[in-house]
Image: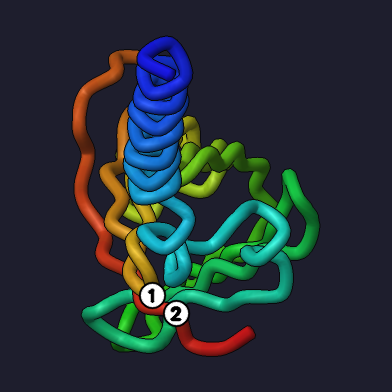
Amino acid sequence: MLKTKNKFARVLKLATIMSVALVIFVGCSKDEDNLNNPTTRELIGTVWIDDINVNTQFGFWTETTGNMILQASEGQWKKEGVFTYSYQHPNIRIDTDLDPFAKNNGTVYYKGVISENIMTLTIFSVVTDEVIGNFTLFKLYE
């Protein structure tokens, strides 16, 4: 009888430990943390505008390419072109020959992060890696 009670106690203790471990494991899921952050596929078809004027637009058309329109708010100049990008939440890199500040003969890349409906980018010279400027973009529509 004593042997049966000890065996039952061990099984009960083991079952309790496994139940607690399962609850902890399931509670550590990060799925809910990323509900509002886009995946690469979810970027397709989205258009983003800058925080200064609505004349600057970034549109994502495939999983690796997009189109950008850069235009001075006074309408003095306008540049349009394609870009390639890579995105692994939250980091994005955009490579293009469109330099919004016309300082680097069009050899720039953008690096930044996307958080929900805001994209924050820093512009770098491909040649010198110096910081040229910054953008904050807001998701306009999808």
Quadrant location, the N terminus? top left
Q: Dot 2 corresponds to which residue?
A: 139
Q: Residue 44 falls in which quadrant of the image?
A: bottom right
**Residue 102 in view here:** no
Alpha-carbon neighbours of circle 2 within 10 Å: few (<14), some, or many (≥20)? some
Q: Relative to the observer, which residue lies in front, 111 or 103? A: 111
Q: In this rendering, is residue 30 above or below 11? A: below
**For residue 80, side relative to residue 23 (left or right):** right
Residue 135's tag is none
Where residue 111 appears, x then y in whole percent?
37, 38
Question: What element does badge 2 sit on?
Answer: strand
CB contact under 8 Å: marks 1 and 2: yes
Residue 117's tag is 1
Q: Residue 22 falls in which quadrant of the image?
A: top left
Where residue 25 appears, x then y in whole percent?
41, 38
| Mark closest to the chain's N terminus, 1 or 2 | 1
Considering every residue shown, the one lying at the far right of the view is 62
Question: What element does badge 1 sit on?
Answer: loop
Q: In this rendering, is residue 99 above or below 125? A: below
How many numbered circles are shown? Answer: 2
Look at 73% across and 44% down and name the residue there.
64
Where residue 135 appears, x then y in whole percent?
26, 60
Q: State the separation of the CA atoms marked 1 and 2.
A: 5 Å
Alpha-carbon neighbours of circle 1 within 10 Å: few (<14), some, or many (≥20)? some
Look at 62% across and 69% down and name the residue there.
59
Q: Relative to the observer, which residue lies in front, 50 or 36? A: 36
* Amino acid type at image mark 2: Lys
Q: In this rendering, is residue 6 above or below 23? A: above
Where residue 49 appears, x then y in whole percent?
42, 78
Quadrant location, the C terminus? bottom right
